[in-house]
Image: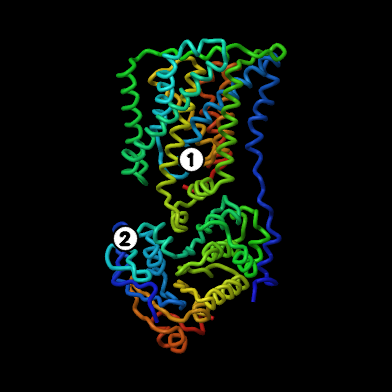
Amino acid sequence: MSAQGTDIDAGAALPKSPRDIVPLLLPLALAAVAFPFIPSSSTWLTLTIAGLAMGMMIFVMASGLTLIFGLMDVLNFGHGAFIAIGAYVATLVLIPLAGWMQADSIWLNLAAVVPAVVLAMGATALLGLAFERVLIVPVYGQHLKQILITMGGMIVAEQLIYALFGPQQIALPLPASLRGSFLIGEAAIEKYRVIAVLVGLMVFAAMLLILNRSKIGLLIRAGVENTEMVEALGYRITRLFVGVFMAGSALAGLGGVMWGLYREQVNAAMGAELMVLVFIVVIIGGLGSVTGCFIGALLVALATNYGGFLVPKLALITDIALMVAVLLWRPRGLYPVTSR
Amino acid sequence: MTALLSLANVETHIAQYHILHGVDLVVPEGKTTMLLGRNGAGKTTTLRTIMGLWRASRGEITLGGARIETLATPDIARAGIGYVPETMAVFSDLTVKENLILAAREGAMDQTRLDWIFGFFPPLKKFWLSRAGTLSGGQKQMLSFARAFIEERKLLLIDEPTKGLAPAIIGALIDCLAEVKRRGATILLVEQNFRVAQAIGDLVGVMDNGRVVHSGTMADLAADAALQHKLLGLSLDTHQ
């Protein structure tokens, strides 16, 4: 006998899984709310594009951290080290290629930037592997020890950078073809910001594609929710942990390169400084959620830009105020995934 | 009867707590063995220890003659064990389809087997592309069953499948288990509902205080009210 005809079919009355689109609309709402307070539409456009670019860079840095926490339940305060190391590796590659960087040919610019990005991501991925195997493995499931040891790891990395490169800022000039602006009406939109938005969107699209369309992605999403059951289905989650940690570290490295080029300089403390923003974004987005992280990064960056322009004295607390407001509304963030 | 799974003097500690105190249990091939006992007797811990989710601190667990107590959980699962936990543990952020894609470890899902599952659990077909988190408790249990049945397994470990479910759903689950049995599956099933246990069990092990205190046939236990009362602290009449 099958179950047909019994009241188990009552499930037909269940609501379809609703798409929670309210958080997706928040960046648009924030931009719309800011519009009347900003004196000219060109200024608003410039601030908005700057906010989007900054948001994308923060997203690239933070997306790996949210996956690492969601899947591995690891509070990695050392994530900032990979941001700084990525930026320094790219700087090391680009300094001898300064001629290509400043050439008017986009191909020579690309011939310098692409290897720098690839090497920065590769180096941070390998360092991530070592970091996970040596520092994280002994403290799985122990949050306090994770905080201490990963924070220690970041301090060591930062001090090593000081020892190797000195305390001074090192210039990381933009390639010639990315200098200058596009003019839209009276608004000047920096080329590099547009590139940063495009790279951020590509990373987001790639992550969504992998997470939603591949078995690895399914395993990561399932593992974020219940690592034990993934193992009970026969999958070795430890290998997945290592892979995700390496990918997250590589993304931090990419974010570091993007940020370094954006500021046109790198310094040893940049990782630690950015970690505050990165943690705020991960918390606002909901631990383990890539989409939440994306929305959170846009919100933080737009609020920073609008807030800094309108009320400069309040700029320092804009991010914290935003986090408090979001958590009062949704205590587990915009799109919480993990139940930890 | 050939033993597919056997536990010999298995002990399990969880932190400072000593939960299993030497479990001896044999699960013969092709039979359904019920694991009964009061709350806290150690039934769920026994299943979790077999799966390697909690480590046996002592004793031997063999599956098809091979020792598995030191293997990691994924290797135990790959040795041929399907597990339906008490909590169902469906991946609520994944769709019904995605849950089953993960369960079908060996590759693409077999359509014939899927149709067979849909025959028992039509809501899984209806909500194929819905997120598992939106399913009702009964439908989640169906999905949890389907994950264990989507590929052939040597042994099925099922933990309290009827807990908190409506009678109609329990009926569907019993029908499904009966069919799985007819196909020759070996099942170790923890169940509190004695009527369900009686309906599908061939053999029974009764646990108390971290040990198996009685082993025998289900028919013998069902026929002996005094033994039930002694072992389970219940009478069949009051539990029906």
User: Badge 1 is on which residue?
Assistant: A67
Q: Is residue A224 visible?
A: yes
At label 2, the amino acid type is: Thr
- Nearer to us in this view, A31 or B31: B31
Local crowd size for mark 2, using a 10 Å CA cut-off: few (<14), some (14–19), many (≥20): some
Q: Position of residue A36 (x, y in %)?
A: 70, 20
Q: Nearer the viewer, mark 1 or mark 2?
A: 2
Observer-nearest residue: A199 or A151? A199
User: Where is residue A335, by image quadrant?
Assistant: top right
**Tag 1, which chain?**
A
Identify which residue is drawn at 39% across, 83% down: B216
Give the colour scheme shown: rainbow
| Residue placed under numbered mark 2 in the picture | B70
Label 2 SS: loop
Q: CA distance from mark 1 to mark 2?
A: 30 Å
> Horizontal and vertical percent for residue A307?
58, 21
| The N terminus of chain A, quarter of image | bottom right
Residue B100, position in %: x, y? 56, 58
Q: Nearer the viewer, residue B219 or A241?
A: A241
